[in-house]
Amino acid sequence: MAKQFDLVVVGAGPGGYTAAIKAADQGMKVAVIEERELGGVCVNRGCIPTKSLLYASHIFSLMQTSDDLGIFTDQIAFDQGKMQRYKDKAVRTYREEIGRIFEQKQICLIYGKGILRRDRTVEVHNSDGKEYYQGTHVILATGAKPVMPPIPGADLPGVVTSDQILTGRDWNHSRIVIIGGGVIGVEMATIFNNLCNQVTIVERNDHLLGPMDRQVAQELETDLKSKGIGVYCDASEVSIAKEDSLVCTFKTADGRPHSKKAGVVLIAAGRKPDISQLCGEDVHLETDPKTGKLKVDGTFKTSEEGVYGIGDLVADIQLAHVAAAQGTFVVEHLAKIEHSIKLEVVPNGMFVSLPIVPSCIYTTPEIATVGITEETARMYGMKVRVGRYSMNENGKSIITRSDSGFISLVFEAYSNSIVGAQMICPRATDMIGEMATAIANGLTAAQLSFAMRAHPTYSEGIKAAIEDAMENG
């Protein structure tokens, strides 16, 4: 007989655990089913470990030029094992905190493979056999898995995904080729470049970072190349072979063939919804044949009554905070309380959907965007004015020797309301929150200028970009 709950959540990543905690706060009896580790990909094989290694490798990179600051050391080296243990501790601490909250709020956590059956019942397979949990409502939040494109040689030893390379203990590679110039690719390139590896990025699109603002992508490409990272966009006919080492061959847009040797090849071609074995034979959930995502309505309800899908299973933007926001939205809908999160806004009565989801990339310098770009605005026929500030004029950037990048702000031309922001500079991922808040609340350039910004700080660039937009609009 199935155990009864108000809400059963399948998947304990950011979307799942956020929904569970929110539901428990609303007095619901909640069960969470997780096949692997509490925290999902983000905590265990994504955001937290990646950013931990980015931070550690950045410190090592800074130390290599510390003599310019009058700081001298006899020897600079890194210990791969200790770096991994530091990463593992960060992951473990974050995961334990989620577990503590679960215990405090009496959320039932069940480890095992969850399979959706009819009547909102989840069949769980684990070492004890089979168990059944039935919810008044069910939320599916099983996330995504790495995409493995049909590249010849992708199955060779030494060809890995981001999941594998993050947990790997052998980093003794002087050369690494990364196939894919999206967020995962450029962040991993930054880590290994910081650790003095020869890094090459091979990207099939004509610029890095896919749909992100082209000016940001071009700035990043310039910065990566200045650090010695090879960047090859518009690549085709990619293949991998094994000689004395791995060899990645490809052609660029000009037809020229290239061949790059590597100790390891990382395939970072994105992630796709993980719906494998999600449903039993008595349940069929509608999916989009093009994307493989679950079809949901405006409340994230799937084609099965009482069953909802969130996160990478349904989202166009695969980010942890998007999944968490959707989980919160669904629970508020189920609890029939006022929504605390806006998933999109439509400014000035125009039929243009403005996502207010910050996108952050933790390269050096950092990249953060929210809202729309000038290019997108003009595509929709919106009249905008754009302010831009080069960070090489910023005092804090000069002090920290990080005087590259820019801040670009996009304002609707008639109301002067901010509709987009693109930043490539230190602390961009922290500063973008101010811009997201401003867009969500329809703040104007004048309102954004009311508050002083301390000197010297990176955020002074925001004020300068506002002034540039108003002077030149």
Image (cartoon, helix red, strand yellow):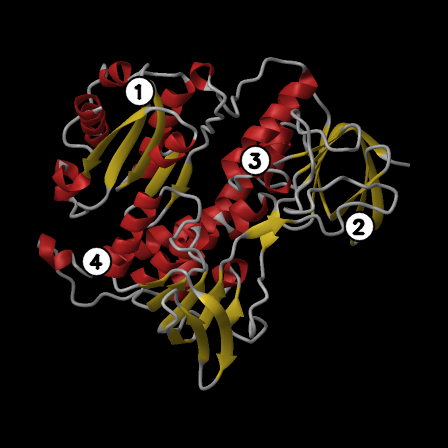
Can residue 137 be seen here?
Answer: yes
Please, what secondary structure does the residue beneath circle 3 have?
Answer: helix
Q: Nearer the viewer, residue 20 or 346?
A: 346
- What is the x, y in percent for residue 4? 82, 30
Please, what secondary structure does the residue beneath circle 1 have?
Answer: loop
Q: Which residue is mark 1?
A: 413
Q: Could you tell whether 170 is left or right of 298 in the image?
A: left
Q: Could you tell whether 178 is left or right of 221 in the image?
A: right
Q: Residues within 10 Å of mark 4 (few under 14, many from 20)?
A: some
Q: Which residue is mark 3?
A: 323
Camera-near label (1 vs 3) is 1
Q: Which residue is mark 4?
A: 63
Identify the residue shown where x is 44% and y is 18%: 347
Vertically, is 420 above or below 350?
A: below
Q: Amino acid at mark 1?
A: Ala
Quadrant in the picture for residue 376: top left
Q: Amino acid at mark 4?
A: Met
- What is the x, y in percent for residue 7? 73, 28
Q: Choose the circle earlier in sequence order: 3 or 2.
A: 2
Q: Choose the circle earlier in sequence order: 3 or 4.
A: 4
Q: Could you tell whether 459 is left or right of 290 in the image?
A: left
Label 1 – label 4 distance at C-alpha: 46 Å
Please, what secondary structure does the residue beneath circle 2 have?
Answer: strand
Q: Amino acid at mark 2?
A: His
Camera-near label (3 vs 4) is 3
Label 1 – label 3 distance at C-alpha: 33 Å
Q: Residues within 10 Å of mark 1 (few under 14, many from 20)?
A: some
Label 3 – label 2 distance at C-alpha: 25 Å
Q: Which circle marks residue 125 in the picture?
A: 2
- What is the x, y in percent for residue 462? 24, 28
